[in-house]
Each structure stands twice: as structure tokens, then as C-alpha cells.
Image (cartoon, rainbow, N blue to C red):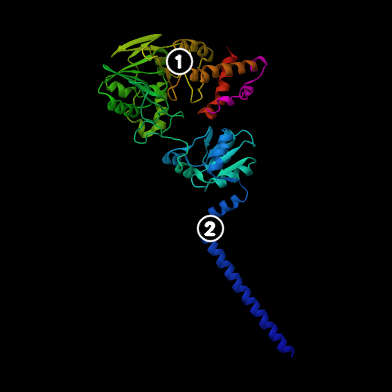
Amino acid sequence: MTNAISCSFILLLSSALLLSTISHAEDTKNQDIVNLVTNPGEQAILEANKSITNIDTTTLQKLLTENPKIEMVDVRSANEIDFIGGYIDADETVNITRGWLEFDIGAHVKTKDTPIIVYCGTNQRSPLAAKTLMKMGYTNVKNYADGYNKWHELKLPIKQTNKAPESLLYALPEKVTDNVYSAIGATAPGTYINSGHNNNLSFIITTEGVLVFNAGDNYLLAKALHHEIKKLTDQPVKYVVLENAQGHSMLGSSYWKEQGAEIIAHVDAVDEMKSHGTQVLERMQHGRRDKSQWTQFVYPDKTFEDQLLIEMGGERFEIIHFGPGHSPGDISLWMPNQKLLISGDMAFHQRLMPVFEDTDTAGWVETWDKIEALGANIIIPGHGGPTNIEEVTKYTKDYLVYMRSEVEKILDDGGSELDAYKIDQSKFSHLDTFNELALQNAGRIYRIMEFE
């Protein structure tokens, strides 16, 4: 009897072990199936979604309307943005590839409670980026789960990295008046993608020839501009005026000389070219790579000090050096018949102006009175679209006056350059290149004023 019970017990135990083994095998099989369906990346996204806040397109639009200063962080690669053609149009936007988020976010987002919205193309990287930011202590982070592709599909506002993919020009020329055109450059720094076209390349067509304002960043870019000019007129380009000695103003001169144009610049700009021209060319060649081919450094054909008059085809062109300003040798072109001023880098409005070590900020403020006295109806600035005197005054003279007054307070109180970096520039923060230039400008204005 006892042996029978023992045998029954052993049989039951063996059956239980067998069932357990089968169950474990089934669990393992099921887990293998799950692993086949859900790869580690997808599992990471599922985990991230448990702790982050996701928003849709309608919510994003509402948040941007309520608070335009929300920091939009695009974690796609720069090449991806360029290939697809842009990013979400917002006042505060920065591209930080997800792999560099931990290293770069601090340079753009100053406080841990700043509202941040991250996004990518299809909501694969941005959930992970949002979770990373939360781990770093950022307390107001949201993830735009619809992603850029959905935003673009809905034809919502975007900023393009290249408006004319069929041309080396960032954007094709637009008509300003009947015979005045301008190819408005990117307000971002010059890059390989925009071919160095990050300033305005303007031209005026007359019955006796064409005048071009700015030679362009390189030979091929100048050629691309000429290609567009020839679509509008058979007249030759007779004059090319260089607004200053910066690369995007003067390095395309070798192309225009081949076309027989006369290159014009201020004497101070030529001095700058003699000192730094070779280095400027080398930097451009490094950044533009194959797009820099055939570009050679050449000097202007004609220089002047105060004013140069050209009359051609019924138009009067007054090329003027108003005085100290953005950089040595800055000049503008005044067309009194049309009350139109091509100001060059003497005026800014859509991007924050850069202050260089040799920028004469005090002299620039005094020079501005001469610009205002012209009574221009239309102004084509060095960067950004055509505008009026009120707009460029707000973002040129008024910015300089404000920054200089704030630095003067710091100096009077015995403050340091570190205090200058704390100046509240928020009313200018919607301007392009604000993040790149605001702190740099504050430091340079302090150093300039410290020894005035």
C-alpha cells in the first residue's frame, strides 16, 4: 500500500515537472516572438513613453501661439534637415543631433524649467531625447509625437534650408522695383548647403548695362547669379560693388572680372583684403569644398574714400561710405530717383547683427543719422528681405543704443565682462542668429567700451 502511494506521488511529481518544463518552453517561445516583433529600439521608445509627455500637432500649434519663446529642439541630423527641406518655423529653434544632446543643450537652454519641445521626423528619436532631457533635470519637456513629416504634410509653416534646390543660390532673385532685383540669402551662417549665399546679392538692370551689388562668396555662386540675370536681360554686367571685405561680398570677384565687369570697393576694404584676403579664401575653400573651384582672390579695379557717382541708362547710383559701422570699408548704394537704398551691412532687421572686434559701435550710432536723412522708401539690407527705415532702425541703431547703455551702467558700477553676458536681450531673441551672436556681442561691446 505504501509503495503504491509512493509510486503515485512520483508519477504526479513527474507530470508536474513535465508541465512546468512545457510551460517554461512556451513562455520562452512567446518571449522570442515578442523579441522578433519588438526590437530594442522600439522597446526603448515604449519605455520612454511611460514617463514623457507627448503632444499632437493641434497642441503644438496652440502652445507656440501662447508662448512663441518655447525652445524647439530638432534632433534630426543636419543632412536630413537639408535633404527634406527645412524645420518647423518657430522663434526659438535649434538643431541638436540626438547623439550630441547632452553636450550641446546647455548652450541653448539656460534654465532647467525652460519650456522645451523636442521633435524628429517620425517620432523615433524624439521620445528618447525627451526622456534624456528629463533625466538631466529639465522639468518642462514635451515630445511632438506627430513629428516634422506630419507638420510638413499638413503644409504648416516651415523654415527652409534651401529655397532654390535647382541652383547654387539659396533663393532666386526677387523683384524689388521694376528694374531692381535681389537674391535674398540665408540669414544663417554660410554653409556648404547654402553655398555661402547668406547675404543679399542685388542687381539693377538699365538700358546700358547692369550693376551688381556684392560679388558673392565664390566663383560658382557668382556664375549662378549671372545665370539668373541673363534670364532677365541681354545687357552686360558693367559694375560690381563690394559692400565690404567679407568673403561672401568679395570672393566671387574673379568670375565677374572674367565677364569684363569693373570691381569697386572702399579703400579701407582693400586694406582689409591685403591683411586677411588669403585667409578668408582658405576658410571659404575649406567650407565649400568642391563648390569653391575656380575661385581666386583678386583685388578691386577701382577704390574711393567718401562717395563715387555712376550714371548709367538713366539711373544715378551714389556709392557712399557713410562713416564707421559694421566693419572697415562698409559702403551702401543710394538710388535717389527711386529713393531706394541698398544698405549692405550698415543695416539689419531679420537677423541679429554681429559685432566684431573692429566694429565701431559709437561711430555706427552717429553714422545712422546720415542714413536716416536720405529719406529712403525702400531699404535692401545686407541680410533679410527688403524693408523700411523704421524696421532697420529698430534692429540696428536701437539695438546698439540699448546695448551700449546697458554696458555703460555695468562700467559705472564697476562690473565685469561677466555682467555684460547677463544683459537682457530678450526683446531681440526672435531674430535669426540670436543664439549664436547675443552673448558674443555683449562681450565685444563691453571690451570696446572699456577702453573708449
Question: Residue 420 in the image: x percent, y percent?
Answer: 61, 22
CA neighbours of label 2 inside 10 A, class few (<14), some (14 to 19), many (20+): few
Which mark is on residue 328?
1
**Quarter of the rendering occupied by the N terminus:** bottom right
- Left or right side of 261 for 276: right
- For the image, the number of numbered tags is 2
Q: Residue furthest left?
A: 234
The region drawn magenta spans 410-430
Question: Residue 256 in the image: x percent, y percent?
Answer: 31, 22
Question: Residue 94 in the image: x percent, y percent?
Answer: 52, 35
Q: Residue at x 40, y 32 (%)?
A: 194
In this view of the protein, can residue 198 be seen by the observer?
Answer: yes
Q: Nearer the viewer, residue 100 or 132?
A: 132
Compared to 426, does 149 lie above or below?
below
- Left or right side of 54 for 179: left
Q: Residue at x 56, y 18 (%)?
A: 445
Question: Residue 26 in the image: x percent, y percent?
Answer: 57, 70
The residue to which callout 2 is attached is 38
Q: Nearer the viewer, residue 116 or 301?
A: 116
Report, in whole angstroms, how far the alpha carbon at label 1 lies from the one at label 2.
61 Å
- Of circles 1 and 2, which is in front? 2
Compared to 235, does 23 lie above or below?
below
Amino acid, disc 1: Pro
Q: Nearer the viewer, residue 99 or 156?
A: 156
Q: Residue furthest right?
A: 2
- Left or right side of 413 for 205: left
